[in-house]
Image (cartoon, grey):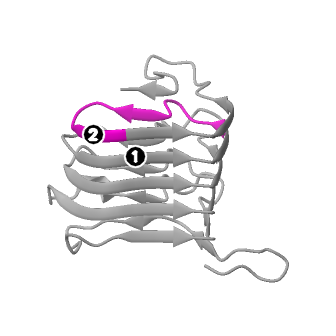
Amino acid sequence: GEGTADGSMPVLKGEIHMLDTWANGDALYFEGVQFDGANGTYGFPIQKKNGGAADNIQISSIIFKNCVITGYSKGLIYEWSKTMTIGELTWDSCDINNINSDGSGGGDVIDFRGASTVGKLNLVNNTIYQGMRTFIRIDAGTWGDIKVENNTLMNLCFVDNANNAGIFGI
């Protein structure tokens, strides 16, 4: 997206659902966009909607750069225990805040529970604050490089329950 002269970004309010009709190999790239979960009305900016029927959806990359992601009730991405293959998953220079901010909505932020494959996970130069249960939850699958570098974190993973694995639940 392209911001206005006063720095305002285009706003996407809601969720992006990867449906069973997803064209394998496609990429998603977002730059300079604000994702708004409407104070918890929406769960994730992007998800494999409720598992769907399709397994092994192929995505070359999902990249968020210079984005603001705020107000979601659960997390940033969830594959609903259906397999996916993602070449690269990146958040770069993003402001990520108020994700499950009161601890009541679940809230594993990067949440992969199925036998998915991710070639690279990059979390670089982000400011991440207020909320979340487990920040990165990986229950199964094959993962390549995981790079977490130059991020500022504040008031994360404070949910007091047995599902909270802290910053990394790998």
Q: Is residue 62 above or below residue 135?
A: below
* Residue occupying the point 28% across, 49% down: 119
> Which element carries disc 1, helix, strand or loop?
strand
Q: Amino acid at mark 2?
A: Trp
Position of residue 2 measured from the top left corner of the image (x, y, whole percent) = 66, 81
* Residue occupying the point 18% across, 40% down: 115
Q: Amino acid at mark 1?
A: Leu
Quadrant housing the N terminus: bottom right
Image side of residue 3 versus residue 14, left or right: right
Position of residue 133 measured from the top left corner of the image (x, y, whole percent) = 53, 30
Q: Which residues are magenta?
A: 130-145
Residue in front for this viewpoint, 73 or 47: 47
* Residue occupying the point 56% across, 39% down: 149
Q: Is residue 123 above or below residue 48?
A: above
Label 2 packing within 10 angstroms: few (<14), some (14-19), many (20+): some
Whichever of labels 2 and 1 marks the residue nearer the N terminus, that label is: 1
Assess whether mark 1 and mark 2 are in contact (beta carbons under 8 angstroms): yes
> Which element carries disc 2, helix, strand or loop?
strand
Q: Is residue 132 magenta?
A: yes
Q: Which residue is mark 2?
A: 143
Q: Is residue 122 above or below residue 14?
A: above
Label 1 packing within 10 angstroms: few (<14), some (14-19), many (20+): many
Q: Is residue 67 above or below residue 143?
A: below
Position of residue 117 measured from the top left corner of the image (x, y, whole percent) = 22, 46
**Residue 121: image tag:** 1
